[in-house]
Amino acid sequence: MSRIVDFPDSLYEQLQSQAMASGFATIPELLANSRVEPRMKEDSLAALIERIDSRREQLRSERGVLPSCVPLIREDRDRMLAERRALFEQITSNRQVMFEQAGRSPDCVPMIREDRER
């Protein structure tokens, strides 16, 4: 079943550009694929739960006791935060090298942003 929706021109243009930027040819494709996102979040949470459960079972087989999930969740969170910090440091380091190679100081980032916005 099809339905017709009346969008203001500005919203239509915004949706069309968002569709193109996301690699979709039409707005309906963009909207259809945007519904997949909650499923992806659910899949991510399900994978996290499976990982924690398997770790609990592993510890139970090693120690004979089923541990609480709280420390395992904290370990997982700390590992993810450490990975993010390492990635941020790598990006920062790469940015520093790029600026040095270009003969610019990293202090010029705000000026570059201003130029780009003009």
Image: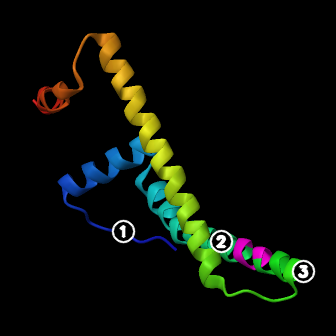
Compared with 98, 49 (above or below) is below
Select label 3 or label 2 by which is in front.
3
Which of the two labelled residues, at mark 3 and mark 2, occupies the earlier sequence position?
Answer: 2
Left or right: 23 with respect to 21? right
In this picture, residue 94 sits left or right of residue 37: left
Residue 80 appears anywhere in the view: yes
Q: What residue is drawn where x is 34% and y is 25%?
A: 96
Q: Sequence-wise, which precedes: disc 1 or disc 2?
A: 1
Can residue 53 be found in the magenta stretch? yes
Element at label 1:
loop
| 75 within the magenta span | no
Q: Amino acid at mark 3?
A: Ser
Image location (x, y in percent) of residue 56:
77, 80
Q: Is residue 39 visible in this depiction of the protein?
A: no
Q: Nearer the viewer, residue 114 or 64?
A: 64
Which numbered mark, 1 or 2, is in the foreground of this view?
2
Magenta segment main secondary structure: helix
Q: In this figure, what is the number of numbered marks?
A: 3
Quarter of the image with the C terminus is top left
**Image quadrant of residue 115?**
top left
**Disc marking residue 4:** 1
Highlighted magenta segment, given as a residue range: 51-55
Left-right relation of 51 to 105 = right
Mark 2 — residue?
48
Task: Give the CA separation, mark 3 to mark 1.
Answer: 59 Å
Residue type (three-letter) at the residue carrying disc 2: Leu
Secondary structure under badge 3?
helix
In the picture of the structure, the residue carrying the numbered disc 3 is: 61
Q: Nearer the viewer, residue 34 or 67?
A: 67
Tell me how far mark 1 sits from mark 2, CA to CA.
40 Å
